[in-house]
Image (cartoon, rainbow, N blue to C red):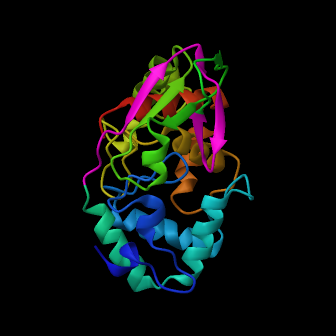
Amino acid sequence: MPEIVAHGRKPDVNACGFCHRADGPGGPENANLAGLPAAYIVEQMADFKSGARKSSLAELSPPKNMIATAKAVSDEDVAQAAAYFSGLKPRRLITVIESAEAPKTYVAAFVYSPRDGSEKEPIGDRIIEMPKDLEQFESRDTHSEFIAYVPPGSIAKGRDLAETGGGRKTTACTTCHGKNLRGVGAVPGIAGRSPSYLMRQLYDVKFGARNGKGSTPMKLVLANLSESDMLSLAAYAASREP
């Protein structure tokens, strides 16, 4: 593990492994880096540094921290971290459940957690993703697993959009991300990754917060998709084997 991943560099570069965990699985609040192409990771760090990649919610701490880190870290550190994370094999960590209801939750730092008791509420047009064990997650345990509640029918709808383009509504995701959505070349795999994170990225690309080189073709793909469509794509991708 490179020093920049394990310990960062004082005073202004936090250890990559603190937020993204030592072997890269991240969580709903940030990216799962395990198995991403090294070139893609380097490109995203450059976009954070240049301002091409931001968040639609400027106050969110994880993207703010990434922007600050990208401006402070060296190119060599980025290259070492990218090579390390790209060499790790992603693991299935998310159980996607279609349900008209989800547990009532509260926000614990950057993630949802169920309130005491068994009370539920209508899910509406939302993704409710949470750690199975909040204490385990907050201790930065890389083996933390997650449950993502999504609206009924969203996985099938997402599969249609991903595999066929939804009747010419868009370009099939499999065209660039591969038939199993595990990535092709420098195109990142999206299978088995956090649906909350995927949804935020789709939203940010569609509405202009992400403007890097890799975002240009994605803007065309998302042009005719609604937020409900993007939610379904995120749910389907998260349900696949990484």
Q: Is residue 23 above or below residue 163?
A: below
Q: For the C terminus, give its image quadrant.
A: top left
Residue 147 spot, x, y in % from top left: 45, 31
The stretch of residues the image draws in magenta is 89-113
Magenta-span inclusion, residue 188: no
> Is residue 166 visible from the viewing direction of this image?
yes
Kindly indicate the quadrant of the structure image that contains residue 133. Answer: top left
Residue 143 spot, x, y in % from top left: 33, 47
Residue in the picture at 51% in, 86% down: 10
Kindly indicate the quadrant of the structure image that contains residue 75. Answer: bottom left
Residue 198 spot, x, y in % from top left: 52, 43
Kindly indicate the quadrant of the structure image that contains residue 223. Answer: top right
Residue in the picture at 33% in, 77% down: 80
Residue in the picture at 57% in, 69% down: 47
From the viewer's side, name the closer residue of 232 and 187: 232
Q: Is residue 203 left or right of residue 193?
A: right
* In the image, farthest residue toward the front: 116
Q: For the N terminus, give its image quadrant.
A: bottom left
Q: Is residue 228 left or right of residue 88?
A: right
Q: Is residue 133 above or below residue 85?
A: above
From the viewer's side, name the closer residue of 178 and 196: 196
Q: How many marks?
A: 0
Residue 90 spot, x, y in % from top left: 29, 49
Q: Is residue 105 left or right of residue 138?
A: right
Magenta-span inclusion, residue 97: yes
Q: Of helix, strand and loop, which mostly describes the magenta segment?
A: strand
> Is residue 172 visible from the viewing direction of this image?
no
